[in-house]
Each structure stands twice: as C-alpha cells, then as structure tokens.
Amino acid sequence: MQAMQVESPDKIRNVAVAGHNDTGMTTLVSALLYAGGVTTRMHRVEDGNTITDFDPEEAERGISIGLAPCFVPWRNHKVNLIDCPGYGIFFTEAKQGMRAADSLLLCINSVAGVEVNTERVWKFAEEINLPVMIHLTKMDRERADFQRTLDGLQKTFGRLVLPVQVPIGRELGFEGVVDLVRQKAWKFTKDGNGKAEPLADIPADLAEQVAALRSQLVETVAETDDMLMEGFFESGTLSQEDLEKGLRQAVARRQIFPLTVSSGSHGIGTAALLDSFLEILPSPADRLPFPAHTVGGEAVELIADPAGPLAILVFKTLSDPFTGKISLLRVVSGTLPTDTAEYNSRSEEMEKMGHLMVLQGKQGAHVPKLIAGDIGGVAKLKQTVTGDTLCARDRPLKVDWIKVLEPAMAFAVEPKSKGDEEKIGEALHRLMDEDLDLHAGRDPETHEHLISGTGQEHIEIAVAKLKRRYHVEVILHQPKVPYRETILKPADGHGRHKKQTGGRGQFADCKIKIEPLPRGGDFTFADEIFGGAIPNNYRPAVEKGIQDARRRGYLAGYPVVDFKVRLLDGQFHDVDSSEMAFKIAGSLAFKDAMAKAAPTILEPIMKVEVHTSEEFTGDIMGDLSHRRGRPQGMDSVNGSQVIKATVPMSEMLEYARVLRAMTQGRSTFHMEFSHYEEVPKPVQEKIVANAKKHHEEEHE
C-alpha cells in the first residue's frame, strides 16, 4: 500500500461512518476506497475481503465488530474514514470512532429509514458537538424512497436536515446525483469504478424539485449568519461564494445537517460523496476546538495547530497474535515525528514511540511524521491503553474521552483443557486491550472466572476470538449467584469431640451461643469464658473451626454471615486435647446451634435503572414486577424515561437479552449491587434442593 504524508490540517477530512446495522456502511467505505484508486476492484462484505472488516470473525459473520481506519487520497486531500460497527452491542466502538473524527457520516437505509441505532448515534454526536452529514444508502433498492425518507428524517431530527444532493432515477433506475450547491448533475456507470461523467444539464423532470430544494437551502444558510442574512434581504439570494462558505460554517457549527445519497454496492454517487466531504465538511483546522483538561482538571481547548503543544489521543488498540499491538492515534495538536518518546499523562511515564504509520484497515505504511489533525498508528506501545493521551512532559494534558457503560451480562468461563487455565487470563487480557466493553476476572465470592460484556453475542464473539487467535477453548455457564446464609434467632450450641483409638486420644468440648447481627455485620467472635474451662491457647482453635464451618454453609453451601458467636464454656483433657480437637468441636457446636437458630438464605439485590422511551414503560415495569422487582420511581431525562427498581440478582442474569427483544434494542440498563435480603421460602426450597443435587452429583 502507498503511504500518504499531509503537510497542512486543511488538507485532511476525518469522517466517522456510523449508523444502524445493515445500512451498508462497510460496503460504502469499500466503494469510496475503490473510487479513490486505493483498491483495483470493488471489495464486498459477502466475499469477506473488505479492507475494514479484517478480523476473521467479521468476515465469517458478515458484520462489523470493531472500528477500522482507512484513507482515500482525493483531489490532493487525505480523507480519513473510520468505519464503525452498526450493531447496538458494539456501540462503544462507534463512540470511539466518533470521538476521534471531525464529522459524522450518519448512514440511513433509504428503504428502512430511521432505526434504533440511528437515534443513538445521532444523540452521541449531539453530546460531543460533532457535525453530521446524513447519507441515504441503498438508493437502488426496491421501495427506496428519497422524499419519504427525507420527511421521516426531518420529523425525527428537525427541519435543519437539508438535501445537498438529489437522486437521478428511482430504485433500480437510480443512476446519478444532482449537486444542489454547485447546480451540476453527475451520471455514474452501474458497477463502475465510482467515477462520474458530468451531464450538460440537470434532467428536466428534476428541475422543479431541484429549484425548490436549492432555494430552501440558500434561505436556511442565510439564516445562520447575520451578514449573510443582510445580503440575502438585499438581493433575494446568496452569491455562490457566500453559499459555499456559509454552508461549510453552518455544518461545522451543527446549524445544518446536509443530506447526500448513493448506492455503494453499485458505485453510484461515490465520487460525488468524496467531493462533498471536501466542500462541505470541516477540516481539523475548521472544527470546533477539541475539549481537553490539564492534570489539575482545568478545561483546555485544543486547535489543530502543527506548531502547537503536542496532544495525541489513543482511540483504539488492535491486538493480533502475529503483528502484536497497534495503537490508533489522532493527533489533536502539534506534530509527532517518528521514533520519539512522549509522555503518557495517565501512567505518568515516558512511552517510546516506534515507526509511525498510516493505515488501510490493519495494513500500515510508514510515514516520517503525523501532523495535527491526522490519524495514524504506532506498534508495540508498552504503557499505553485506549483512551490515553500522549503529550509533552512539561505540559501534561488529558484529551476528553468517552464514557464506557457497565457490562450488561456475565458468563462463567472454564477451559476445556485443564492446562489452559493460565492461557485464558493472558488471552482475555489482550482481548480487553482491544475491546473496552469486555471485562474478565475471577469472582472473589464464587471463585469463578467471569467474562462480562454488552450481550450474549458479544461474549460469544470474544470466545470465538479466544479459540481462533489464541487456541484456547472454553465452556460458558451462567455465573453463580453469591447467596449468603444467616440466622433469625439466638441459639445455644454444644460441640464435643472424643476419640480413643489406642495411644493418645482426642478430646475437646465447647459450648457457644449464636445471635443474629444486623445486615452487613458479617461475623464476630467473643470469648466469654471465665476461668480455665478451656486453656487460652485452645480458644482461637474454636473460632477457626467455626470460621471453616460457616464458610462451607449450613443449608445450601453458602457462607453464613451476620451473626455473633459467644464462647461460654467447655472442657479439656491434659493429654488428649489439641488445637485440632477444639477446631472440630467448634465446628460441631456451630452446626448444633445452626439447627436451632432458624437458618435462612439471603440473596443479593441489585439497583436497576432502565433507560427507555415512553412506549415501552408499561411492558418493562410489568416484566420487572414479574422478576420480583420493586419499583423505586421513574424520571424523565433528555426525553427518555428512566425506570428505577430493586431486583434480585438471580432474576437479572439474562435480562440484557430479554430487554433487547422486548424493546427492539431501543432500551439500555445499568445495575449495581444494593444490599442482601431474605429469599422467599418457595425460592429458598429450590436453592436448597439444587445445592443438594449438585453435591450428590459431585460425590457420585
């Protein structure tokens, strides 16, 4: 592949390509690469050979899983494209790509219109003040309708969604575009290389529509600027220069959202789209300043000045068992030469940078430097992870990053082969470097190895990567719920251990009283023996025996908590007593007391927040009640409904999948631990029966 060195930020466009799944984003990016001469033929998702779906899992499944960078040389500019996944479970990847870009190409299927992830992508662009160009894909499809989709977009996102292109032809007859800004028409060869031939005139059947839409565009551009408005009132229109300049400024300030069209799979409209990137979307030099903070927390605004202070955002890590780790960089300010050492403001250490490269997917070509505004990569950084800022040591900065949501679902994971225990940890660590939504680690309560993510498919893809990349095969199970056991009333217990087998015997006797403690009290031990009924050196052994027994549980094998033990009395033998004997006596006394203390099971209760739209609130609240949930209120935040409830953890293990199905993926949820409370008796009986069955199976 050819490297491309850029010398000025105004010669760069950084565009994140995002939207709902199945809008043809990767196909469109492939068509743009073909039109720009990067590839010699059109690469297709169906063939598994696209530049930006380079992971074998992506090729096999026919979907994008992670973001991928590429670039198109076009009219002496470098157009950096970030191809983002469209599936909701990979939304964090889309957010990473958008954070690194200067504008968003929001792809809309012209048959389906606005879909779930369309709205999520739009909302995040709004949060980070990112300019948006809306793009209608699949204009050649049956039932693709420009006007109907435009009406739907304006209804959902407002009247500032304005066409800057109009399609020539409908459905299978779609063959070109009219540029409303320059008033030119272009015709494309179906399945050609994306290059266009200009038409002498705008097709007669479109003249009226083009005139009306252009007039609306001119008027709206004039409304965005007082000086332009004055000129518009004087002459009734804008000069071509004022229109183009005013449109660029309005788009950069999110005052207008231009609409373009194409059929990526047939290469229709691609050259015109690349032209519109250069003419309408902001360069790094034109964008609003990049938000950042000093280490002390003071807000800083960074502009794309190659001579400015160095600030580099690491927005993605690619991990490969053969090529190793590649960090994707957005140079926000300053100039980064190859082979330098830069300061990591999070780890507070210098990071040695090797050869810099520009990337087409995962393939890199070396460049001597990356200037402010450019996107590239560097291999084998040691300290640096995704989201870090690299900068000058004497001016440490932190470029603003995205918020990563808590995992929605967890599975317990065990290796198929016993020898793979250690390999699992190392392999999962590499996957977590690459995927911010993936979490893994050992649960200190249940001692299971857990893998957590945004949904079942997300975790299954991670497991497939473990096998393909690192040759580690694992089995997934639902994770164990960390139940607890406790007591409801005080009780006395007596433990006597006596054994005579010839020679020295074993003897210990102790009497205890156990009492409930408030929730969260865990366990306390009080030595209340007066005199020498049990010598001082044996009393700690009684506590050890009780500790061992309580960890093993009484009803169903779960730790016993929230109780106090008082050691009251006992007996010993000068010869036959020992620490081990008193340890056994302590455990026997504990079991004796537990039988009389009304033992019961506690379960973890989670605080749950569900973010949804009003149409689903009834179904969600009904479902949470069915899960033994208790409503804690409902708030309205930014047009969304936030349902709050407390729900037992055992009822939430598969909630991510259920919520997605119930709301067509339009809702999200977050949960965190709240407290423990007693399990209802019918549920308790099932837990005890399952524990007994599991115990019997293990000892067969």
Image (spheres, rainbow, N blue to C red):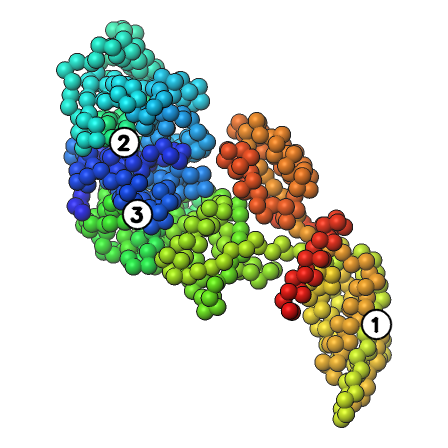
Q: Residues within 10 Å of mark 3 (few under 14, many from 20)?
A: some
Q: Would you name the residue on which mark 2 appears?
A: 264
Image mark for residue 31: none
Q: Is residue 9 left or right of residue 602?
A: left
**Proximity of marks 1 and 3: CB atoms separated by less than 8 Å:** no
Q: CA distance from mark 1 to mark 2?
A: 80 Å
Question: Which residue lies under the disc numbered 1?
Answer: 494
Side of 367 relative to 399 (left or right): left
> Residue 681's spot in the image, x, y percent?
76, 50
Lower position in the chain sequence, tag 1 or tag 2: 2
Would you say 494 lies left or right of 433 here?
right
In the figure, residue 652 lies in which quadrant?
Answer: top right
Compare marks 1 and 3 and give the one earlier in the sequence: 3
Q: State the image coordinates of residue 660 (x, y, percent, origin top left).
A: 52, 38
Residue extending furthest toward the bottom = 503
Residue at x 40%, y 25% (from the top left corner): 113
* Cα gap from disc 3 to disc 2, whole angstroms: 19 Å
Residue underneath mark 3:
54
Report crowding for label 2: few under 14, some 14 to 19, many 20 or more residues within 10 A (C-alpha). many
- At 17% across and 40% down in the image, what residue appears? 40
